[in-house]
Image: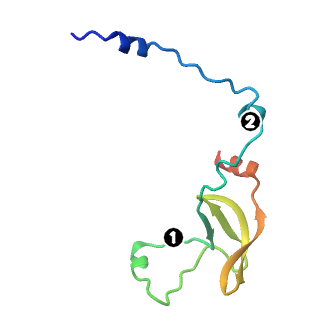
Amino acid sequence: MNQPTEAASAHASERVEFDSLHGTAAGSGEVNLDMILDVPVTLAMEVGRTRISIRNLLQLNQGSVVELDRAAGEPLDVFVNGTLVAHGEVVVINEKFGIRLTDVISPAERVRKLR
């Protein structure tokens, strides 16, 4: 049977000490977002949804019309990484589509919806 070497047993019994969080941004309630400001996220706008059978899906071709669950004129949903963050309306700027935000979901409301 192999006996552990002195170095291995000394290493296994070392204590690890962590710095105190008191007085730091994490402990004081302040949040420093500078570290994450350049992290890319996926922003998606949803006009509406529908459910169709695979049979009907396979029959779709150019010119097919799919009815959505949302009425014309209703606001679009704006998602960031799959989480609803706002509602808005479609605008056209320099021949490109955009969205004008009409209602932004508060962070507290987003957290409440997660539960």
Q: Quadrant of residue 97?
A: bottom right
Q: Earlier in the sequence, mark 1 or mark 2?
A: 2
The residue located at (58%, 19%) in the rendering is 17
Residue farthest to the bottom, as pictured: 63
Q: Position of residue 27 (x, y in %)?
A: 74, 31
Q: Does dot 1 land on a helix, a strand or a loop?
A: loop
Work out whether 33 lies above or below 66.
Answer: above
The residue located at (58%, 62%) in the rendering is 42
Q: Which residue is mark 2?
A: 25
Q: Does dot 2 land on a helix, a strand or a loop?
A: helix
Q: Is residue 1 left or right of residue 72?
A: left
The residue located at (54%, 81%) in the rendering is 66
Query: Closer to us: mark 1 or mark 2?
Result: 2
Q: Is residue 66 left or right of residue 38?
A: left
Q: Position of residue 111 (x, y in %)?
A: 69, 47
Instruction: Identify the image's colour scheme: rainbow, by chain, secondary structure or one colour.
Output: rainbow
Neighbor class of circle 2 (other Cα within 10 Å; few <14, some 14-19, many 20+) is few
Q: Position of residue 115 (x, y in %)?
A: 65, 45
> Is residue 6 or residue 87 the one in the foreground?
6
Looking at the rendered structure, the number of numbered marks drawn on it comes to 2
The residue located at (57%, 80%) in the rendering is 67
Q: Amino acid at mark 2?
A: Ala
> Is residue 93 or residue 76 the one in the foreground?
93
Q: Which residue is mark 1?
A: 51
Q: In which quadrant is the N terminus drawn?
A: top left
